[in-house]
Image: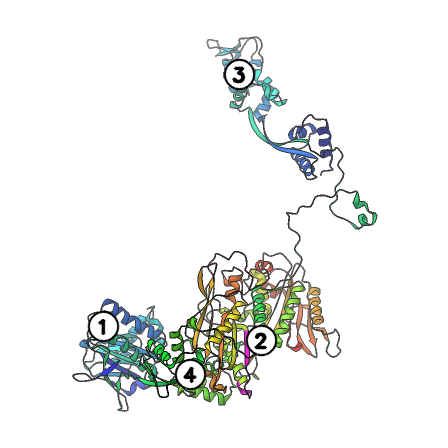
Amino acid sequence: MADGPVAEVLLQRLEAADGGLDSADLAAELGVEHQTVVGAVKSLQALGEIIEAELRSTKRWELTAEGEEIAREGSHEARVFRSVPPEGLPQSELMRLPSGKVGFSKAMSNKWIRVDKSAADGPRVFRVVDSVEDEVQRRLQLVQGGQAEKLGEKERSELRKRKLLTEVTLKTYWVSKGSAFSTSISKQETELSPEMISSGSWRDLPFKPYNFSAHGVLPDSGHLHPLLKVRTQFRQIFLEMGFTEMPTDNYIESSFWNFDALFQPQQHPARDQHDTFFLRDPAQAQQLPMDYVHRVKRTHSQGGYGSQGYKYNWKLDEARKNLLRTHTTSASARALYRLAQKKPFTAAKYFSIDRVFRNETLDATHLAEFHQIEGVVADHGLTLGHLMGVLREFFTKLGITQLRFKPTYNPYTEPSMEVFSYHQGLKKWVEVGNSGIFRPEMLLPMGLPENVSVIAWGLSLERPTMIKYGINNIRELVGHKVNLQMVYDSPLCRLDAERGPPSTQEAA
Amino acid sequence: MFKRVMPNGEIQKLIITEETAKIRPYAVAAVLRNIKFTKDRYDSFIELQEKLHQNICRKRALVAIGTHDLDTLSGPFTYTAKKPSDIKFKPLSKTKEYTACELMNIYKTDNHLKHYLHIIENKPLYPVIYDSNGVVLSMPPVINGNHSKITVNTRNIFIECTGTDFTKAKIVLDIIVTTFSEYCENQFTVEAAEVVFPNGKLHTFPELAYRKEMVRADLINKKVGIRETPENLAKLLTRMCLKSEVIGDGNQIEIEIPPTRADIIHACDIIEDAAIAYGYNNIQMTLPKTYTIANQFPLNKLTELLRHDMAAAGFTEALTFALCSQEDIADKLGLDISATKAVLISNPKTAEFQVARTTLLPGLLKTIAANRKMPLPLKLFEISDIVIKDSSRDVGARNYRHLCAVYYNKNPGFEIIHGLLDRIMQLLDVPPGEKKGGYVIKASEGPAFFPGRCAEIFARGQSIGKLGVLHPDVITKFELTMPCSCVEINIEPFL
């Protein structure tokens, strides 16, 4: 555009002009749309200091449609006058003329005509003067010619009252020479090209200024899911701490490994239909390690290993019931059982991060499926102090350094602790995990030596992810209703880096 | 110290008949004599029963508690079971008498009681407790009679707990009487009641047993990670209402376990109390000394490597649900559910939880459907587990780690999905060609695929999956409008 004909003409006119020119005037002169001139002005502006353009609001007087008609045909009153012949005209006839009604009263007040009411065939209109000056038409023609300023304000407002004139606001540019003014504008290059490099012509070519405030073109890339980015980080943390990953590739579990082996009694409410997904097919686990099963049965129903037991009738059928695992602690139980079969005992550190299923009430922060993170340490002489120490190292890697511990209850750990950390954004202590030492009734029937303690802790993967990425509704993160744009835009997962100002929304 | 005392006059008796054996065999009873309620204590008394019902009583299935104004009744009491039509009484809060059948109907719409009807509903006989004048005390576990209801002014309370778990019934009785014996004139005493079992055996309740346990001081220190003297440990435990003293060689602590602590079944329960009294946050944090070498689970290691390169290939990762409707994995893909070997869930609340997925494809297609407004093409992938029935496994089912990718655009992009498969094989170091250890695709068909645009993938001697253009029926059934091609393979052969 800057090299278009309008721009060229503009520059030439500007050279000749004294001070500057108005864009609307130029448009009228050239017979082009005002917008075309504006476009030329803008593209010249983009080239730098060639022109200076000041946005102005100008008011112009324009004729209305009626005003234009009058400028052409004369005012109504003049036409009325002209249609009265020397011998007069019956008023009724006059009124039938196009300008009759409007012009009659005006012509009367101008004293151009008179009415003889006593005439024989009705009131008759006669001329009073011989000729008239059609001031209104003259004035309108002045405005039409662009000389509205020659009229007095009173005259203009009178014409406006008669709806013959309107005031129009026009935004125009007052264009003047810039510091780098020149009538010749060369075409500006946008990009360096291979020809320019080989010929060296780039040295002499002007380049269009780059708009650094616009965005670039995002690369056409794939993306990883935010929850799984967080999972990768947690895996990393466990591996850095020397924890071995347990196999957890079994969503289907038997009640035995999910509950009984963990010393959770068969009458526990969590084994109800409304908290656990039981299976219709396959309904029962066919294979269980029977000698271990008998030890578990005895511990539940009669006690043993220093315990009173629960003193109820333990049923094998109940233990065979298949379900979708409610926690990955069942995988930990399997791993500890395998460990116990290896003699002599060697210490172990295990972890897992995988999916679990709960048949509970669903809401904005709870789904039927979620991911559990679990860490386990089995060694001689472990204490609660060791558990707290391991937790401190683990959470430090998450950027959480202030920890407090509160007593709680789990069916399979004793002592048990809830882990809290101080959330800077919410200005309160929030729960970040659950932990404890596994009960001897769980470990000893497996065959683990008596002075071996097993400490464990767990948390969900979804909760820290929702806090980290500022997501309030879990359905936007997990499942098919995910917000794909959020997946595209989510940053790297750096668990120990502060993510800008903390989210002010209530954490999940 | 809580004491069971014998009454001044005759002891209250509860006689259990053999009819209860098939439905709710156990009962225990006790009396709280000369109790003084205030509004708060009364409310608390009701609330405790509710809380116990919800947890240890497992929503009244294991134990149900009935508390009655003894002054409105006259023993001995009979606990029996009768045909529902033969039971007629005025229940709590009602103004006239109803038969048990009528009550079952009435309570079907009662938001509180409807949850307990199933415990006895379909049985031929319902449990019921009478006094010697035929007044109904209660029909456990559903509702008490209005006649013997407790008010703020009640002075003498007869408590009965019936259920299917004898141990729990005894524990529940102990908890109620110990908690409220504080408000009896003879504080912390509970009047005994006798229960006669069908075999003629007599038991006196409540048991209110105290027992003594012995724990070594150094065991407590060792397990918690502290260094307290035995005397200090005894003091800490006593503060937790476990009266303790050092005995013997100065290292043994003898602890008296009151009837209020049915939860103490192992030394670890005592050790927890000691740790709580010490203060968890006062324990010194230490690290275990043993070092261990970490290993990744090979399948997860492979998955992590593949995920990153799938994203590098321009595909976006999805995370979809493992549970879905039967339609999603069968009808919508042109299959019959029986052909899928899917694991079926019992009593799903909604269709979304009918089965465990046998393929990752429905999840990805639903993700596209939920993100219709996003610019095309949509290129999604997921590497995650599916579940298939397998009788060789101990539980009868197993997971398989699948990789699935879809391309959704104005054109199906078969060559793009095919190219992705080639890239995956390249990354897995599987050369093209029938040669040993290589991969090849062969024309195939399937109800989910457009005819002539489907192939089966063979690698390392076995079929690992399929790729192709999706059949328009599949596309419309998942509420999509554009052509779509996909590939889904099992990655476990590549471990």
Q: Name the residue tied to disc 1.
A: B150
Report x, y in % for residue A76.
Answer: 55, 19
Residue that sits furthest to the left in the current view:
B9
Residue behind mark 2: A242
Residue nearest the viewer, comparing B438 with A163: B438
Pointer 1 and pointer 4: residues touching (CB < 8 Å)? no
**In the image, which disc is placed on residue A94?**
3
Q: Are the residues flagged by discs 3 and 2 in contact, CB closer than 8 Å?
A: no
Mark nearer the viewer, 3 or 4 = 4
Q: CA distance from mark 2 to mark 1?
A: 61 Å
- Is residue B217 shown left or right of residue A168? left
Residue type highlighted by circle 3: Leu
Question: Over which residues does the magenta segment extend?
Answer: A340-352
Answer whether labels 3 and 4 touch (C-beta < 8 Å).
no
Say which mark, if any, is on residue A470. Answer: none
**Residue annotated with mark 4:** B218
Residue B485 counted in the magenta span: no
Q: CA distance from mark 1 to mark 3?
A: 108 Å
Q: For mark 3, name the chain.
A: A
Disc 1/disc 4 C-alpha distance (Å): 50 Å
Magenta-colored stretch includes residue A350: yes
